[in-house]
């Protein structure tokens, strides 16, 4: 009771009624089957039952799509139980009070029975039997079969629809929210048709129950009237058959209406613009169809012996409909022609949608690669789309923010086997692949040169061959690593996404990350952004971290580090450097196992001091090094990097915080996957191992050069 009172206080009366109407209604249905009802209450309930059935049928006719009436299976269940409950209640009254006359069970039952029977028991029984046959054999059986087939095909088509949504999402046609709504709609559609398959059994069972109740009422009425109330067999038949047929008709007509509603729902074709009446009028309003109808009726109208007047009236009516529909179709064609004329009059008109492209990432394919996107099978998307989806998920997980959709499209200006990757409107990578071949890359033990198109692997620049598919077994037996063409593009795309992650992070993405963190740490977010760090400055800081592949997964730790630096007036670039020691472990754990020491490359102390001195002299212009010295340094680091790659280890340079950033910018121009850390970024609990030292020879050469310059 307290719950009911609290609910009533929070809601208005109508909301209260809506909340508790179903529980109360179920209790009333149960009570109807147990508690005897008076005749006037039966009249009210039978009228309400007819009203509900008509309402359900009208709603079914007015919906645009079956899912617009997704509650129909449940409504059908309640309506069926209501009707059966009324049958139980009316049967009790008929068998108990039927001897008192035909009005013993109420005026509704008496009126239906007397009107349909027209003074003849046989007429009433036959009419009732025909209604049951129509309901059970025609409508209910057909609706049940359609529901069963629709449920099976809907469930079978769900995987294909899900893949189509993923394809549209990756191609940029749908946003993430739209894709989520589409997936919900598909799941809802499967549940709906599955429920409808079972709901059709309610209607069938209801029709069978109507026949059994009719038989029970007639037999029971004849026995009770003759035995208990001393009525003759004729008097019992006259009274109880009228009551029974009336009761059956009062129940069977709503049952027939609900069966029609069920058949309408399951046979309905979805439409975004028209209800059922609009669909039928549009599709049947063809003048070419109405003209021959009118001609045939006219022919029957002039045949002697036929009801000429009726056929001629039908011919005139069909002719009027044909003229009207022809006129409407002519108006539509004229409107389309006017639009075409307007377009021809303005040939230079260009819409902004034709030239604008807001995709963050684009993958343009030559026409020879379209088969990788469009699969021949209806239930599956192309292999490239699935590959891109997996790459986006993995990179998003690694870096800590959602990578934007990759818009995949064809470009006729490209060669048949060429592709381009764009970040915004800038082409950042391009190469060629062969959709009908596979890429074979030789391994360490490979000795035999295989026949194929010799190329460089687009991701790592290794020698490789595009081979025919029938040569795959031979290549693998000779220690070649064979890769699918979609995997080649996928690996290249993965490399590009990691490299340009900083360009892909927008202020909207940062705000989304803050909103997500505020659910757990609201005070931290409110105190840092935007009070201490404006949103655009925080975006710059996170971009700087991503440029050097430092993940931003732990946004909480980043904000805590920034809050500790709030008393220092630093630029966003300086804050980026200052916050790195707090989160460097996220980067280190990706390149080194927890229990293994981190292999690092250091600089000779004298050479490092020389670089620091050069950095101080160059001030804000970056690290200005003598070209010859820079060339020697980069050459040495590349040699060390090649050795590390052969051992499957990452190249990690550790240097002073003063020159870390400038040195990283210089080295990343020549070695993309290099990691440059400062001494302050090495975790205290992480063991390190110096694998090489750079600069001993170069520092000696530089000293000698300086001495020569001094002597001169």
Image: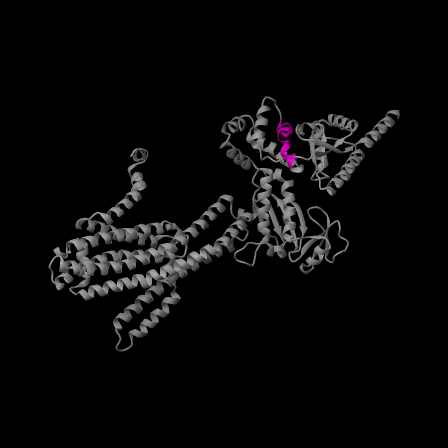
The foreground one among 40 and 322 is 40
Q: Is residue 575 magenta?
A: yes
Give x and y (percent) for residue 603: 76, 30
Relative to 501, say whether 266 is above or below.
below
Quarter of the picture containing the N terminus is top left
Q: Residue furthest bottom?
A: 304
Q: Residue furthest front?
A: 227
Q: Is residue 498 magenta?
A: no
Give x and y (percent) for residue 625: 77, 31
Q: Residue at x 76, y 39 (%)?
A: 638
- Could you tell whether 256 is left or right of 603 in the image? left
Quarter of the picture containing the C terminus is top right
Give x and y (percent) for residue 17: 29, 40
Q: Is residue 483 visible?
A: yes
* Range shown magenta: 571-589
Give x and y (percent) for residue 51: 26, 51
Q: Residue at x 30, y 38 (%)?
A: 16
- Could you tell whether 35 is left or right of 456 in the image? left
Q: Quadrant of residue 582?
A: top right
Total number of numbered labels?
0
Q: Quadrant of residue 320?
A: bottom left
- Could you tell whether 424 is left or right of 690 in the image? left
């Amino acid at each position: 009771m307290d719950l009911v009172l609290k609910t009533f206080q929070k809601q208005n009366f109508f909301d209260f009624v809506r909340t508790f109407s179903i529980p109360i209604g179920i209790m009333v249905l149960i009570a109807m089957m147990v508690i005897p009802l008076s005749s006037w209450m039966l009249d009210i309930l039978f009228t309400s039952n007819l009203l509900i059935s008509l309402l359900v049928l009208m709603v079914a006719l007015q919906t645009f799509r079956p899912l617009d009436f997704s509650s129909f299976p449940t409504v059908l269940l309640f309506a069926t139980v209501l009707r059966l409950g009324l049958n139980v209640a009316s049967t009790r009254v008929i068998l108990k009070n039927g001897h008192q006359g035909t009005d013993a069970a109420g005026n509704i039952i008496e009126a239906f029975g007397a009107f349909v029977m027209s003074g003849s028991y046989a007429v009433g029984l036959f009419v009732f039997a025909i209604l049951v046959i129509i309901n059970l054999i025609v409508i209910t059986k057909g609706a049940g079969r359609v529901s069963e087939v629709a449920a099976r095909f809907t469930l079978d088509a769900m995987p294909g629809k899900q893949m189509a949504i993923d394809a549209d999402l990756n191609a940029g046609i749908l946003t993430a929210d739209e894709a989520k709504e589409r997936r919900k709609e598909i799941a809802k559609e499967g549940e709906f048709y599955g429920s409808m398959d079972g709901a059709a059994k309610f209607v069938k069972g209801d029709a069978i129950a109507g026949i059994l109740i009719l038989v029970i009422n007639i037999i029971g009425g004849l026995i009770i009237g003759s035995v208990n109330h001393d009525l003759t067999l004729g008097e019992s038949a006259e009274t109880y058959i009228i009551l029974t047929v009336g009761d059956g008709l009062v129940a069977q007509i709503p049952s027939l209406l609900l069966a029609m509603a069920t058949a309408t729902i399951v046979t309905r074709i979805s439409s975004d613009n028209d209800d059922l009446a609009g669909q039928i009028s549009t599709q049947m309003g063809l003048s070419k169809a109405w003209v021959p109808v009118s001609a045939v009726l006219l022919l029957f109208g002039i045949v002697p012996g036929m009801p000429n007047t009726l056929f001629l009236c039908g011919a005139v009516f069909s002719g009027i409909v044909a003229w009207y529909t022809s006129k409407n179709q002519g108006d539509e064609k004229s409107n389309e022609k006017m639009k075409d004329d307007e377009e021809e009059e303005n040939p230079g008109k260009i819409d902004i949608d034709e030239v604008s492209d807001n995709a963050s990432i684009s993958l343009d394919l030559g026409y020879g690669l379209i088969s990788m996107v469009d699969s021949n099978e209806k239930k599956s998307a192309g292999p490239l789309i699935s590959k891109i989806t997996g790459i986006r998920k993995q990179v998003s997980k690694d870096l800590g923010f959602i990578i934007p959709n990759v818009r995949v499209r064809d470009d006729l200006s490209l060669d048949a086997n060429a592709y381009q990757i764009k970040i915004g409107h800038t082409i950042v990578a391009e190469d060629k692949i062969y959709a009908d071949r596979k890429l074979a890359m030789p391994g360490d033990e490979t000795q035999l040169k295989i026949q194929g198109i010799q190329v460089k692997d687009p991701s790592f620049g290794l020698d490789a061959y595009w081979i025919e598919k029938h040569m795959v077994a031979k290549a693998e037996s000779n220690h070649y690593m064979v890769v699918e063409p979609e995997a080649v593009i996928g690996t290249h795309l993965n490399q590009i996404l990691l490299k340009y992650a900083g360009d892909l992070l927008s202020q909207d993405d940062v705000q989304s990350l803050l909103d997500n963190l505020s659910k757990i740490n609201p005070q931290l977010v409110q105190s840092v952004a935007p009070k201490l760090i404006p949103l655009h400055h925080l975006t710059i800081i996170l971009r700087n971290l991503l440029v050097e592949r430092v993940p931003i997964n732990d946004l909480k730790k980043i904000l805590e580090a920034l809050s500790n630096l709030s008393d220092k007036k630093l630029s966003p670039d300086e804050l980026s450097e200052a916050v790195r020691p707090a989160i460097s472990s996220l980067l280190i754990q990706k390149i080194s196992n927890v229990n293994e020491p981190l292999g690092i490359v250091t600089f000779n102390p004298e050479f490092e001091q020389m670089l620091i001195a050069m950095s101080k002299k160059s001030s804000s212009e970056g690290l200005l090094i003598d070209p010859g010295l820079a060339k020697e340094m980069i050459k040495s680091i590349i040699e060390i990097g090649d050795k590390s790659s052969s051992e499957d280890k990452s190249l990690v340079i550790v240097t002073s915080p003063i020159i870390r950033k400038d040195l990283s910018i210089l080295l990343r121009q020549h070695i993309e996957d290099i990691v440059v850390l400062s001494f302050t970024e090495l975790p205290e609990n992480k063991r390190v191992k110096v694998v090489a030292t750079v600069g001993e020879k170069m520092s000696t050469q530089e000293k000698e050069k300086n001495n020569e310059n001094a002597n001169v």
